[in-house]
Image: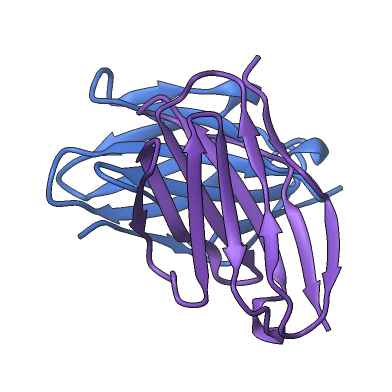
Amino acid sequence: AQSVTQLGSHVSVSEGALVLLRCNYSSSVPPYLFWYVQYPNQGLQLLLKYTSAATLVKGINGFEAEFKKSETSFHLTKPSAHMSDAAEYFCAVSSYKLIFGSGTRLLVRP
Amino acid sequence: DVKVTQSSRYLVKRTGEKVFLECVQDMDHENMFWYRQDPGLGLRLIYFSYDVKMKEKGDIPEGYSVSREKKERFSLILESASTNQTSMYLCASSPGTEAFFGQGTRLTVV
């Protein structure tokens, strides 16, 4: 069975600070892993994806994530937060069906 | 660009009504999904389909059914709407890796 756990329903950072959003997964087969972003009143937009190539994946808007099989983690980072990064972020796993975590709302303080 | 179109952005229905939510994709994707999104619960999979006339239950299928008569169209049906089905409904299509989402339908059952 697949599952995704996102630690922290809300994360607050100052503008310019490091962003770290945590995601752990479980899957019985090698998974595809994804991070999506949702801005208010919009659908989900793909930030980045891991499909068993490089373990460090770069996405849009300066985000990146590292696949760590030993830790079953796929944490999302960005070196310097911008006000426009405020949104809800979802981690997802797919090996048979696409399953999402509960989401983390990122707040960016001026 | 991939386009996933959901027929309504906002919908208000009465308890007991039969409700149809329509989703159309224009990229010839094999896979289509219906999710509901509720605060603090993330996206929960209702049903998905791997091909025309094929469907599989997701994690919360109770009270819902689906129809996929044509490859591009995946319909979600609420057989008898109830107030606990008030939610945001998101449709997605996928070629097998990442999913592409529609804008969502916010359904209110009164």
Q: How many marks?
A: 0
As displayed, is residue A5 above or below residue A82? below
Residue B103, picture quadrant: top right
As displayed, is residue A110 above or below residue B45? above
What tint does the image give chain B?
purple
Residue A75, picture quadrant: top left
Q: Position of residue A42 (x, y in %)?
A: 77, 44
Position of residue A12 in the picture relative to residue B41 (left or right)? right
As displayed, is residue A101 above or below residue A93? below
- Which residue is pictured at 20% across the width and 60% down the height? A1
Q: Position of residue A57 (x, y in %)?
A: 40, 24
Position of residue A73 in the picture relative to residue B106 (left or right)? left
Q: Between residues A67 and B30, which one lies in front from this camera angle?
A: B30
Q: Position of residue B56 (x, y in %)?
A: 33, 55
The quadrant in which the C terminus of chain B is found is: bottom right
- Which residue is pictured at 45% across the width and 76% down the height? B62
Q: Position of residue B10 (x, y in %)?
A: 85, 57
What tint does the image give chain A?
blue
Q: Is residue A106 visible?
A: yes
- Which residue is pictured at 77% across the width and 66% down the height? B107
